[in-house]
Image (cartoon, rainbow, N blue to C red):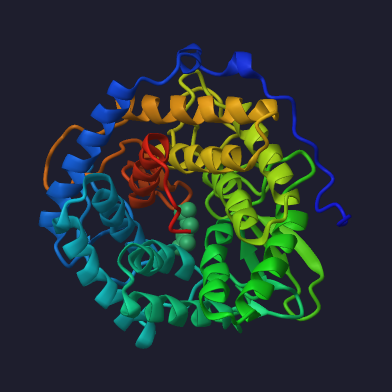
Amino acid sequence: MQAALHPARPEPLQTAGLPQAWREPPSRARLDQAIAAALAAVARNAVHFGEYFPKPSSTGGVYPAMDNTEWTNGFWTGMLWLAYELSGKPEFRGVAETHVASFDRRQRERIATNHHDLGFLYSLSCVAGHKLTGSEQARTAALGAAELLLERYYPGAGIIQAWGDLNDPAQRGRMIIDCNLNLPLLYWASETSGDLRFRDAANRHIEQAARHIVRTDGSTYHTFFFDADNGQPREGKTHQGYSDDSCWARGQAWGIAGFPLVARHNGDTRLLELGKVLANYYLNRLPADGICYWDLIFTDGPEERDSSAAAVAACGLLELASRLPLLDPLRAEYERAAAGMVLTLSEHYFNHDGAPGAGLLRHAVYHKPNRIGVDESCIWGDYFYLEALTRLSRIWEPYW
Ligand code: GLY
Ligand code: GLY
């Protein structure tokens, strides 16, 4: 019997507080309509961006184009792979393959790789490309990225540093909840190469995240500092949330998605229990239409929603539900909530604008405290919306 990871137990889920409309079974016709609209937007933007990428967030609803130098570029390539799987159309694959070559060069030449988001970047571009086409270039590039990610691991503290140079005093020893989604790259690297260094680092990091970034009430810090050398926990701080003791909605969503995705790789069912803790905290703090505000401290009023956090959470709930026993009553509740969330996004947040470069989901927030991408589209929101539609409509093997 393993030691408990975390003392928190899930809050009872307040199902009466969730939108009434979510109790209806999702209709296949509505889902198919949502998928068709999303695929039309991806097809339009594949022609528009070509070998370039959308910026992390839109301006006036339209993404400016950029080179492959941000932490977010993999989301767009991931959307092309999903569109290829959903439609079978070779034009999506063709553009995604030009991106794989760009990601290969990026890791070889270390272009803007001095951060932990290598998992977001390479799982969705190169691991996906390898899984779908068998490309050796994609596999080699993703393994190279996993090596770069491992350079950020402190064995003494058992954590991967999120941002900046390892000797930067402002960043040294900082882990962030978002990193949960970067760990699947490390597990994949061990699975494909037989080299267990990647898996061992990921196992240590996820335990530190479980113990320290999750608070006793089931909410999460965005970021947490450790002494990088001896691993002493120091303090939790926000970066993109309202305050150090509030709960940044997307951080909570990264946790809902990330703990179960890691459990898929390492089989630690304690991470599923923790997923329930985070999921119930999140679901119990939604406004009337079920799409979260940018920080869960807000449950009504004029603050902005973060549709991108809702899309991440929907995928997380579906991943978590898929790992729970059939007799767990939360399993059906999470599936219902995820399907309801996705259909609400498609009916009330989808951008029908049709302009070249336009985002898919309106009303997301990138960084409210720094006033970046507030009430705009965010490319990860669009990615997870399409991943959620994929998960709802077919049996799907994650790229994670
Ligand atoms: N500001 C969030 C990030 O770059 O990961
Ligand atoms: N990973 C940075 C963000 O969610 O904005």
Q: Tell me if residue 23 comes above or below residue 7 in the rendering.
A: above
Q: Residue at the bottom extreme? A: 109
**222 relative position to 300: left or right:** right
Left or right position of 175 against 384: right
Residue at figure coordinates x 21%, y 35% from the top left = 36
Estimate the x, y position of residue 246 in percent, counting from the top left: 65, 41
Quarter of the image for the N terminus: give it. Answer: bottom right
Q: Is residue 143 visible?
A: yes
Residue 273 or 11: which is nearer the viewer?
A: 273
Q: Nearer the viewer, residue 215 or 95?
A: 95
Depth check: give the residue in front, 219 or 240: 219
Q: Is residue 317 left or right of residue 306?
A: right
The quadrant in which residue 223 appears is bottom right
Q: Residue at x 31, y 38 (%)?
A: 361
Residue occupying the point 45% across, 20% down: 289
For residue 127, above or below residue 328? below
Determine whether 69 is above or below 398 in the image. below
Classify residue 131 by image quadrant: bottom left
Image spot of residue 44 (x, y percent): 13, 47
- Name the quadrant containing residue 340: top left
x then y, percent, for residue 274: 72, 45
Q: Is residue 285 visible?
A: no
- Where is residue 12? Give x, y as percent: 74, 25
**In this rendering, is residue 164 above or below 75?**
below
